[in-house]
């Protein structure tokens, strides 16, 4: 190579809470080590210095909700060698994808005095709906250690090692007794992807699905169990599946199966 | 010599703030014609999709408005719900809620002071560049920030979008022994913070004192987190439930965005500077002493000095956390029982950036009928714009680059959280 420069890292934001990119700044102990390895070329939350593209690795937070967003994500894709979507907004549309089940004009009228000034799309969409995404890092919020793994993997030209099994495995690893069996608490752990180290069951509450569906989940079976064994009402199931990953197809379809159910 | 009669200071994408915003200031013949803080972050419609959700979901859902201050959203939400159910959280559980808030103040304030604001005073584009020349400063700051995050991570479950907060209390109370490492870190942080507050006192501050109406909570004994009356330095003294009677949104001719104002009075100022001016006597002795050592009296009207005040509040939060952890009374149960009923409830707590107001109406089954959320940055927007006008006029002769950076700094005085403000702003802004 003629010149050896540090790989350029860019962090982009669409509709979101800022929490996933904050995870990078929350890597207090590792932050300076990371910036030794990469050039932070675009990270507005942290710096007013802006380096022109192209970028070696783009981390994209947030969902696509406006016509301008669509143009911008295409430009970012063009300028990026690898593009990783981070967090539930970028991978599933986020909590704001609840609009997908309603009427966005009615939503705007409920919140804003002048809804006609609000420029917004009918749906909140994940990044992959508009451009090719090299990797999706799940979570609401993402796990900062997984984020470091993703950055390290792309710096070394390998695939990130991010497990896609369920939260149940993490409960077993952590030694947490099954909260659904032992305490009769509704828990989405059996169908939710790991990554949080089974946090909620360890704190005595059921998993509420921050990381979205695991690989090959049997959501229909779990929801049937919730109904029969735990007495969950259909509307409870609809709400449980419609939170931060409501826009994910697996959770969406299952929630629709219960939407018009009568008990 | 440049003799332009009009000059526009414009930044299309503000850096080192949370969320996406822009500003522009237009100067003609040395007079500021227009100053706008523009919010172009897309709306997410929280108040709309909260309808039909259970009261119990509000703390987790509203936390997603802001990844920087999720605890504030959770606290305002649970207090509003508890007001409806007629539950008061007392004793150890109340102390633990204060402890959680201490953690959020520490991590949020230190993030702002050293990662976002300090680089302006020292002329760096970011904290990473600053770290090259001041490694110890940045390493110390990161370690203090981590101590705050550790509190939130242990008591809340994780730093961002904690999972342990519920109406009535918590899901699980960490055992005393789980805190021992954090207590040691906080003791270290306390000593270092005293020096860092002094360090902020010697930063170069522009001459910029303004007359503001400061609004903050005031509690009979405590520096405010979760409870108190809303007071101001111009005579406001109301219960939280009267917020919407006194705070209104007005449409101003100079701008197409709506601004929060005190009825018949005008813009107001929330956040660390407001709390400090209205509650100096409630700070811990060490925090008061640190303020004096940094050259601050009991009041401060220069928003650039908010970096000192954030340091003083950080020191207070460390002191308060250590006080709570010293007794660490483990409650009998992680939460108190309550009966769900319908009604309207209000919650207002002191987010790191200022008062965060929630109002919910519930039906008899505890389902949300309507919700209203007013975050601090939306309340400060009119004041930020007023500052831009007042700041630019005497400095209009400065080279554009320099003036632009100073305007950015003037906005960052407020630690604006645009992710929060967005869902509240009623329109997008002209020609953005």
Image (cartoon, rainbow, N blue to C red):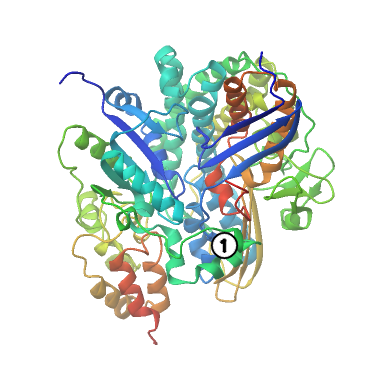
**Which chain hosts label 1?**
B
The crowding category of the residue bearing disc 1, from other C-alpha atoms within 10 Å (few below 14, some 14 to 19, many at least 20), is: many
> Going by the image, does A105 lie left or right of A171?
right
- Which residue corresponds to mark 1? B47
B348 versus A116 height, above or below: above
SS label for mark 1: helix
Q: Which quadrant of the view contains residue A107? A: bottom right
B258 versus B280 height, above or below: below
Q: In terms of depth relative to the viewer, which is nearer, B368 or B382?
A: B382
Q: In terms of depth relative to the viewer, which is nearer, A44 or B192?
A: A44
Q: In terms of depth relative to the viewer, which is nearer, A253 or B161?
A: A253
Position in image of residue B9 (x %, y %)? 62, 30
Can residue B282 be seen here? no
Seen at 24% across and 48% down, the residue is A135
Q: Quadrant of the C terminus of chain A?
A: bottom left
B148 versus A164 height, above or below: above
B277 versus B293 height, above or below: below
Position in image of residue B369 (x %, y %)? 59, 71
> Going by the image, does A12 lie left or right of B314?
left
Seen at 53% across and 64% down, the residue is B337
The number of discs equals: 1
Seen at 37% across and 36% down, the residue is A24
Position in image of residue A99 (x %, y %)? 46, 66
Q: Quadrant of the N terminus of chain A?
A: top left
> Going by the image, does B250 lie left or right of B22?
right
Q: In terms of depth relative to the viewer, which is nearer, B432 or B424?
A: B432
Can residue A121 be seen here? yes
Q: Which quadrant of the view contains residue B220? A: top right
Position in image of residue A168 (x %, y %)? 23, 58
């Amino acid at each position: 190579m003629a010149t050896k420069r540090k790989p350029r890292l860019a962090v982009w934001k669409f509709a979101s809470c800022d929490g996933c990119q904050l995870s990078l700044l929350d890597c207090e102990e590792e932050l300076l080590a990371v910036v030794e390895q990469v050039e932070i070329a675009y990270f507005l939350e942290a710096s007013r210095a802006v380096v022109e593209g192209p970028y070696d690795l783009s981390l994209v937070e947030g969902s696509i909700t406006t016509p301008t967003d669509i143009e911008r994500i295409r430009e970012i894709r063009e300028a990026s060698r690898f593009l990783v979507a981070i967090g539930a907004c970028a991978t599933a549309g986020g909590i704001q994808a609840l609009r997908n089940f309603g009427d966005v004009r009615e939503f705007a009228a409920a919140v804003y005095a002048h809804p006609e000034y609000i420029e917004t799309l009918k749906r909140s969409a994940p990044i992959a709906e508009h451009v090719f995404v090299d990797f999706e890092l799940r979570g609401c919020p993402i796990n900062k250690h997984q984020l470091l793994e993703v950055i390290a993997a792309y710096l070394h030209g390998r695939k990130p090692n991010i497990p896609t099994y369920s939260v149940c495995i993490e409960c077993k690893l952590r030694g947490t007794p099954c909260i659904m069996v032992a305490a009769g608490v509704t828990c989405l752990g059996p169908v939710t992807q790991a990554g949080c180290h089974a946090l909620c069951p360890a704190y005595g509450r059921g998993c509420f699905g921050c990381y979205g569906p695991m690989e090959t989940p049997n959501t229909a079976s779990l929801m049937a169990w919730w109904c029969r064994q735990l007495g969950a009402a259909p509307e409870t199931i609809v709400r449980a599946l419609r939170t931060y990953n409501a826009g994910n197809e697996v959770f969406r379809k299952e929630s629709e199966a219960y939407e018009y159910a009568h008990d | 010599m440049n003799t332009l009669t009009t000059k526009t200071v414009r930044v299309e994408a503000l850096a080192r703030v949370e969320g996406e915003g822009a500003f522009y200031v237009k100067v003609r013949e040395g007079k500021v014609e227009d100053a706008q803080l523009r919010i172009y972050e897309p709306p997410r419609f929280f108040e709309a999709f909260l309808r039909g959700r259970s009261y119990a979901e509000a703390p987790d859902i509203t936390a997603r408005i802001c990844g920087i201050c999720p605890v504030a959203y959770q606290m305002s939400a649970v207090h509003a719900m508890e007001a409806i159910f007629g539950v008061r959280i007392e004793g150890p559980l109340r102390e633990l809620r204060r402890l959680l808030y201490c953690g959020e103040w520490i991590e949020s304030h230190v993030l702002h002071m050293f990662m976002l604001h300090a680089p302006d005073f020292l002329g760096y584009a970011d904290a990473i560049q600053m770290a090259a020349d001041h490694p110890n400063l940045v390493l110390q700051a990161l370690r203090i920030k981590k101590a705050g995050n550790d509190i939130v991570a242990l008591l809340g479950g994780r730093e961002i979008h904690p999972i342990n907060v519920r109406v009535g209390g918590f899901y699980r109370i960490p055992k005393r022994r789980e805190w021992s490492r954090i207590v040691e870190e906080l003791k270290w942080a306390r000593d270092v913070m005293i020096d860092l507050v002094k360090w902020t006192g010697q930063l170069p501050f522009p001459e910029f004192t303004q007359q503001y109406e400061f609004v903050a909570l005031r509690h009979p004994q405590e520096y405010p987190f979760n409870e108190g009356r809303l007071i101001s330095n111009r005579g406001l003294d109301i219960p939280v439930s009267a917020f919407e009677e006194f705070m209104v949104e007005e449409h101003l001719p100079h701008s197409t965005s709506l601004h929060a104002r005190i009825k018949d009075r005008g813009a107001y100022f929330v956040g660390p500077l407001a709390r400090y001016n209205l509650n100096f006597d409630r700070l811990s002795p060490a925090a008061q002493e640190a303020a004096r050592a940094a050259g601050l009296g009991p009041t401060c009207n220069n928003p650039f000095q908010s970096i000192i005040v954030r340091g003083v509040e950080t020191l207070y939060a460390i002191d308060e956390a250590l006080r709570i952890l010293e007794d660490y009374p483990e409650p009998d149960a992680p939460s108190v029982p309550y009966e769900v009923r319908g009604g309207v409830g209000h919650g207002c707590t002191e987010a790191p950036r200022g008062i965060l107001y929630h109002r919910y109406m519930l039906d008899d089954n505890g389902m949300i009928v309507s919700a209203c959320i007013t975050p601090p940055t939306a309340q400060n927007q009119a004041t930020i714009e007023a500052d831009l006008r007042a700041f630019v006029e005497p400095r209009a002769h400065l080279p554009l680059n320099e003036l632009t950076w100073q305007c950015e700094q003037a906005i960052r005085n407020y630690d604006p959280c645009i992710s929060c403000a967005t869902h509240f702003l009623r329109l997008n802004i002209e020609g953005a």
